Structures are given as C-alpha cells and as structure tokens.
Amino acid sequence: MLPLQTGLVIRLGEMAVDMRVLYSLLILILGYVLRRAAIRLIRGDSDIITDDARWWMVTIRNLLTVATAAALFVLWAPELGEFALSITAFAVALVIATRELILCVSGRIWAITIRPFDVGDWVEIGGHTGEIIDATMLGTTLQEIEPREYRYSGRTVTVPNSHLLTQPVINHNFRKRFLQHEFTLWTPAGADVSRIGTAIERALAAEAEEFSKLANRYAALIEKRTGVRLGQIAPSVRVETASDGTIGFRCMLFCPRDRAAEIEQAAAQAMFRALARSSEPVPSAAE
C-alpha cells in the first residue's frame, strides 16, 4: 500500500501546484483589468491629463502592482520558502547581480518616505529638468523642460530611481507659474552705459506693470510656504564688465514663466534701439 499512498500524495501535490498556477493567472488578469478600468475611469474622455488625475493614476497603478505581488507571494509562499532554503548561495549572487534594481527600488522607497516631489512637480534630477509625469518602482519619467526657454521640449526622460540616492533632487515647482528670471545683455566696450541701462529699465518696467499685483501676491504665497524671503521682485538692472572690456547689463525680475522669453526679447530690442541712437552722429551747432 505504501507505493499507492506515495503516488496519491504526488498526484495531490501536482494538483495543488496546478491550482496555484491557475490562481496566479487569475490574479494577474484581475490586477490588469482593475488597473485598466481605474485608469479609464480617472482619465475619462479628456485628451489632456490633469496633475490630480495623473497622481491618482500613478498611485492606483502602484498600489495594484504591490497588491498583485503580495497576493502571488502569499500564494506561492511554501514553494518559495523551500526554494530559498535550497539556494542560499545563489540568492547572494543574485543580490549582487541585481544591485542596480535593488537600488532603484530603494530609491523609490526613499522618495515615498521623504516625498521630495509629487506627480506634476517641476524637478531637476541629475542634470535633467522636467515635470514629473510618471513614477514607478524602477524609474521616474520627466516631461523635459528646456531650462533656457522654460518650455516643454517634447522629449521624455526616464531617470532610474537609483539616481535619487546619489544625485541631488531640486524641486522647482514654484517656478511653474512665476520665476525669478535672470539674464545678461552684452554690448561692445565704450557703449553709452547710462542711456542703454535706462532704456532696458524702462522696457522691463513697462512689461512688469501688467502683472505686478499678481507677482506680489504669488511672491507672498511662496514666502509664506517656504518661510524665506525672495528678495527684490521688482525689475532691476546691474552693470558688469568682462575681461575683454565688453559691458553686460544683468537683468532680474519676478515674472510669469510663459512671459520670460518674451520679456527678455523686449529688453534686448530696447538695448539695440539705444545702441543705434547712441551711434548716430551728433548735429553740429551750424546745423
């Protein structure tokens, strides 16, 4: 009877494994269906995804991923336990081989704990600047922003989460609407500093007049949240020189992000007009 009993036990064991395979497939399918349904429900028929909707999509997807992995782990725990005991040496080698993946997961856990950014924030990670549009356990996806023009480049950058542990994370979220814009306009040596500086200051003041009240309110909001004063937000111009004698006009103002390039162009045009007038010949008394 012993061989028959042994055969029966083996057959029951095979049936249990087969059922766990079936349950695993059902868990994976259920997780996928729930994720698709949740994303479709949150997104709706809109072509543009808001920051709140994107945050919910990322959060629900990560929660469903963790729940699916936990369910599979519980289902296969006995086999995993026996397997782990039999391949301890292999597990050590596997950890060494998957060091980068472990660092990525650790970086994501660090980000969840510290919360240096949320989905929708403007950040700078390892030299890449962009808006957070996705965050998984292995990588963070940025919609790249050109730091000079403050506009979307159309490219996406996926940064491994291991960079979060080794690179500084700079949050520029307050610059999403307003920013402290600084730029320098250069003129040849010997230019009329007084005339050109006055022309640039007037151009900046004229541009800033449209949004001065809104800028003051937004600056006060930032100062209240951060507890740090932003300093001067009114337009200002400083004169500096280079080693070759050229003269630079350092311009600073607190302005809407989408107007930064336009304001810089207005100041440059004012500078060129002042240069043209200063180069005109002065009429003599006889004329």
Image (cartoon, rainbow, N blue to C red):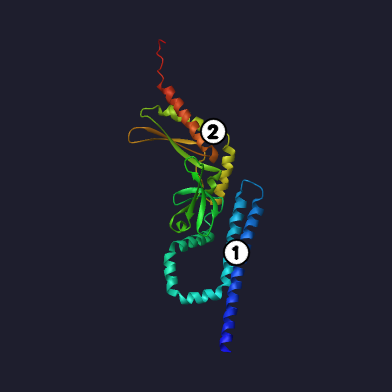
User: Is 234 located above or below residue 193 in the figure?
Assistant: below
Q: Amino acid at mark 1?
A: Leu
Q: For this rendering, which residue is in front, 270 or 166? A: 166
Outermost left residue: 244
User: Is 2 located above or below residue 250 in the figure?
Assistant: below
Q: Give how far apart the Cα atoms at labels 2 and 1 are.
A: 57 Å
Q: Amino acid at mark 2?
A: Glu
Residue carrying label 2: 207
Judge whether residue 228 can be spotted in this image. no
For the C terminus, the image quarter is top left
Outermost bottom residue: 1
Direction from residue 262 to residue 240 in the image, left or right? left
- Give coordinates of residue 66: x percent, y percent: 57, 64
- Give coordinates of residue 38: x percent, y percent: 64, 57
Name the residue located 43 percent from the left edge and 72 percent from the top edge. 90
Residue carrying label 1: 28
- Give coordinates of residue 47: x percent, y percent: 63, 46
- Give coordinates of residue 258: x percent, y percent: 54, 39
Identify the element where label 2 is drawn: helix
Name the residue located 53 percent from the left edge and 61 percent from the top edge. 113
Residue density around tag 2, few if under 14, some if 14–19, many if 20 or more, within 10 Å: some
